[in-house]
Image (cartoon, rainbow, N blue to C red):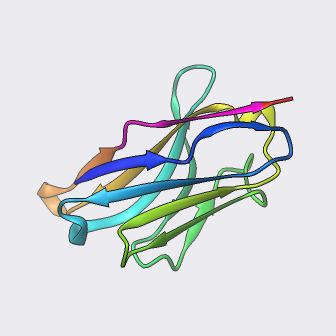
Amino acid sequence: VQLVESGGGLVQAGGSLRLSCAASGSTFSINAMGWYRRDPGNQRVLVAVITSDGGSTDYAASVKGRFTISRDNARNTMYLQMNSLKPEDTAMYYCNADVGSGRNRMMYWGQGTQVTVSS
């Protein structure tokens, strides 16, 4: 599975961005997907996650009510709509996919897309 993010950029505080994550390869084996970002300590932290059918989502407390995760399985693409952006949302954002099952279960990552929010 290959994951390619897009949609990052520079935006003023209060603005919006929409990130996309396009999946290719063995997309039929993708389970949950999520968005992560690097925190100031350089750790990747969960921003939002969505189940394989898109029926359930969860968010970090810091983005709840401002960000919306979704996926279009027909297009093999996941999205993150980010509204009311704050300077503290500035980070590299990564797409993640939980693929396979049992002993063949693996996590895949995209290369990241930079989001910069100016004050």
The residue lying at 44 percent from left, 47 percent from top is 5
The residue lying at 42 percent from left, 59 percent from top is 33
- 38 in relation to 93, above or below: above
In the picture, measured across the screen, residue 97 lies left or right of residue 15, that is left
Point out residue 32 in the picture as x, y percentages from the top left corner.
Answer: 39, 64
The residue lying at 39 percent from left, 73 percent from top is 52
In the picture, measured across the screen, residue 11 lies left or right of residue 6, that is right
In the picture, measured across the screen, residue 77 lies left or right of residue 67, that is left
Point out residue 58 in the picture as x, y percentages from the top left corner.
Answer: 60, 62
Q: Quadrant of residue 66?
A: bottom right
Point out residue 46 in the picture as x, y percentages from the top left corner.
Answer: 55, 45
Report the magenta residues as a range: 110-117
Q: Residue furthest left?
A: 103
- 33 in relation to 47, above or below: below
Q: Quadrant of residue 73?
A: bottom left
The residue lying at 48 percent from left, 47 percent from top is 6
For the C terminus, give its image quadrant: top right
